[in-house]
Amino acid sequence: MTGKVFLVGSGPGGISLLTLRAQQVLQDADVILYDQLPGDEILAALPEKAEKIDCGKFGGMHTLEQSEIEELMVRRALEGKNVVRLKGGDPFLFGRGGEELETLRERGIPVELVPGVTSAIAVPGSAGIPVTHRKYASCVTIVTGHEDPGKDEPAIDWENLAGNSGTLVILMGVRNLPVIARKLVSCGKDPETPVAIIERGMRPDQRVTTGTLATIGDIAKARGVRPPAVIVIGDVVCMYREDDPWLVRV
Ligand code: SAH
């Protein structure tokens, strides 16, 4: 009998942000395919008995090609195994979960989606920044900052984004941040627009760096900002307080 593949989101940080369903399917898994984004706490607690495969896709370094990951999932499921594909945040936001779903559908493998708390909303929130606010932004756009010219992804319409008064949340944007900031300004966005970068959100060593579109590139470089980080651009950033005794994290 064919096994089942679970596309599972781990949430943005510790075990307490895994859903109950995610914990359940991890416990029952025969095979777990993961990368580093779920973080040490979750990865260290993966059940002993499962075959664990590190797909090692992190910060642009691929140890397993996407097609190899998909092939492995299919092969193990055809062997009758329950396979968990564990991804950071939610599996359907920039995690290539959509492509995996397509492959599994094509090959007739049963799939279950286990959604996760996405870093795009939870990580700004953990720094006291709501991505929308009645006073500051009534919409939010989530963008990848990692445009790979080799991929056949639709190119990002920066002009359109610069003209958008809502909040811009950029994932995978650390390396390209100086270019992104310049692009937005050259497309007409106010250089004084506030920007926050939250590194390792909801982890014990979370760090927040703030600036404006005009200054953030240099500030981030000086502070050695590194992925994984969520970048927030827009007036909601004014909600951030360096010392926020009212903000308690899990
Ligand atoms: N599916 C994930 C996003 C995958 S893309 C989600 O829903 O959250 C990977 C990017 O997510 C990273 O480059 C970073 O921008 C962001 N990210 C994920 N977890 C994060 C965390 N704990 N802190 C900061 N950024 C995080």
Image (cartoon, rainbow, N blue to C red):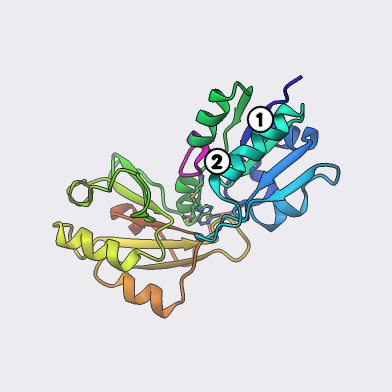
Residue 245 location in percent, x, y? 54, 61
Residue 33 location in percent, x, y? 68, 44
Give the farthest residue toward the right: 49
Residue nearest the observer in this picture, 99 or 233: 99
Amino acid found under the numbered disc labelled 2 = Val
Q: Is residue 7 in the magenta section?
A: no
Residue nearest the observer in this picture, 64 or 163: 64
Residue 95 location in percent, x, y? 51, 44
| Magenta region, residue range | 90-98
Residue at x 18% of width, y 57% of height: 189
Q: Is residue 96 in the magenta section?
A: yes
Tag 1–tag 2 contact (CB < 8 Å): no
Number of other residues with Cα within 10 Å of mark 2, as a class: few under 14, some 14 to 19, many 20 or more: many
Quarter of the figure that contains the N terminus: top right
How many numbered discs? 2
In the visual, does 130 lie left or right of 65? left
- Mark drawn on residue 117: 2
In the visual, does 207 lie left or right of 147? right
Asked whether mark 2 and ligand 1 are closer than 8 Å, the reply comes as: yes
